[in-house]
Image: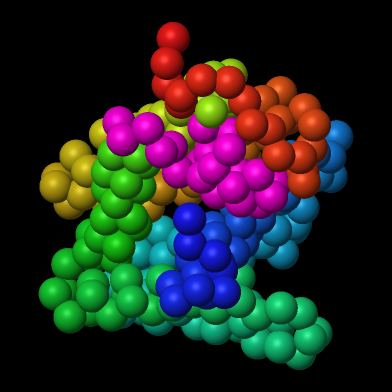
């Protein structure tokens, strides 16, 4: 087995740390805490995080209905910029708002370039396609991505795969995230193809945080049940992963 001090070990350690960080950013670091309204709010970034996720999209949908495409896009990007500036002024971490600004600006740029308002949502649709493909492939390959990320976050590495209960729980919860992105695509792609921009923007908002937060809570409960020993416990398990 490659040691982290051997050639390639540093890269592997960095990849493992990145997976753990991704799980933490997704909210799984809160899985060991009691599930309360406060903990759920913190996991989605608090009130500020909710506003940063909703305001640019809401501004676009509202202004597109009563104004022109450039105005709607300009205000949407402007709101995202203001949210970043607010974090800078208050000396808060800017990375969450910067990610939103980047996505908003790229989507707006594409829509302005093509002149098609629905192209403002292409990036989001492709992100859901990638999630469905990557998560589904990981399940079929026996390496469910939610489990991989949580395993490193809980300092268990890949040992959880040898525990049937943990392995199956991570398979099912990864499939639940596949289902969420697939549902978004099932609703939003027909609206995109039929150029129903206002409805597309509305359903993107409705199928965003209102569905993400409940699924995150369910994921917490599954992770807590599957990893009752908590972070830092290495479980050798029994038997190859996925065996009945």
Residue furthest top as drawn: 244
Q: Indicate whether residue 146 is drawn in magenta.
A: yes
Is 179 left or right of 220, judged from the image as shown? left
Give the residue displayed 23% in from the left and 72% down from the top: 111
Is 21 left or right of 141, judged from the image as shown? right
Q: Indicate whether residue 126 is drawn in magenta.
A: no
Is 223 left or right of 46, judged from the image as shown? left
Q: Nearer the viewer, residue 164 or 170?
A: 164
What x and y, as percent, mark residue 184? 35, 39
Is 158 left or right of 223, judged from the image as shown? left
Query: In which image quadrant can residue 225 be found?
Result: top right
Query: In which image quadrant can residue 76 be found?
Result: bottom left
Query: In which image quadrant can residue 49 be found?
Result: bottom right
Q: Nearer the viewer, residue 79 or 173?
A: 173
Q: Which residues are magenta?
A: 140-161
Give the residue displayed 80% in from the left and 31% down from the top: 229
Give the residue displayed 68% in from the left and 33% down from the top: 235
What x and y, as percent, mark residue 80? 53, 76
Give the residue displayed 35% in from the left and 40% down from the top: 138
């Amino acid at each position: 087995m490659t040691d982290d001090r051997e050639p390639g070990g540093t890269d592997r350690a960095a990849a493992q740390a990145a997976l753990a960080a991704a799980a933490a950013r997704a909210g799984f670091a809160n899985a060991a805490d009691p599930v309360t309204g406060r903990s759920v709010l913190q996991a989605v970034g608090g009130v500020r995080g909710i506003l940063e996720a909703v305001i640019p999209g809401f501004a676009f949908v509202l202004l597109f209905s009563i104004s022109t495409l450039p105005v709607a896009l300009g205000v949407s990007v402007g709101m995202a910029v203001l949210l970043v500036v607010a974090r800078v002024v208050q000396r808060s971490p800017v990375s969450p708002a910067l990610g939103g600004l980047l996505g908003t600006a790229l989507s707006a740029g594409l829509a302005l370039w093509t002149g098609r308002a629905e192209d403002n949502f292409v990036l989001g649709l492709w992100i859901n396609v990638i999630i469905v493909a990557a998560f589904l492939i990981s399940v079929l390959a026996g390496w469910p991505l939610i489990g991989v990320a949580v395993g490193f976050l809980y300092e268990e590495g890949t040992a959880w795969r040898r525990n049937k209960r943990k392995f199956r729980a991570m398979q099912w919860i990864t499939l639940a995230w596949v289902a969420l992105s697939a549902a978004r695509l099932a609703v939003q792609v027909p609206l995109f193809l039929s150029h129903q921009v206002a409805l597309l923007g509305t359903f993107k908002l409705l199928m965003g945080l209102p569905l993400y937060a409940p699924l995150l809570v369910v994921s917490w409960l599954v992770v807590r049940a599957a990893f009752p020993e908590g972070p830092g416990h290495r479980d050798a398990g029994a038997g190859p992963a996925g065996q009945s």
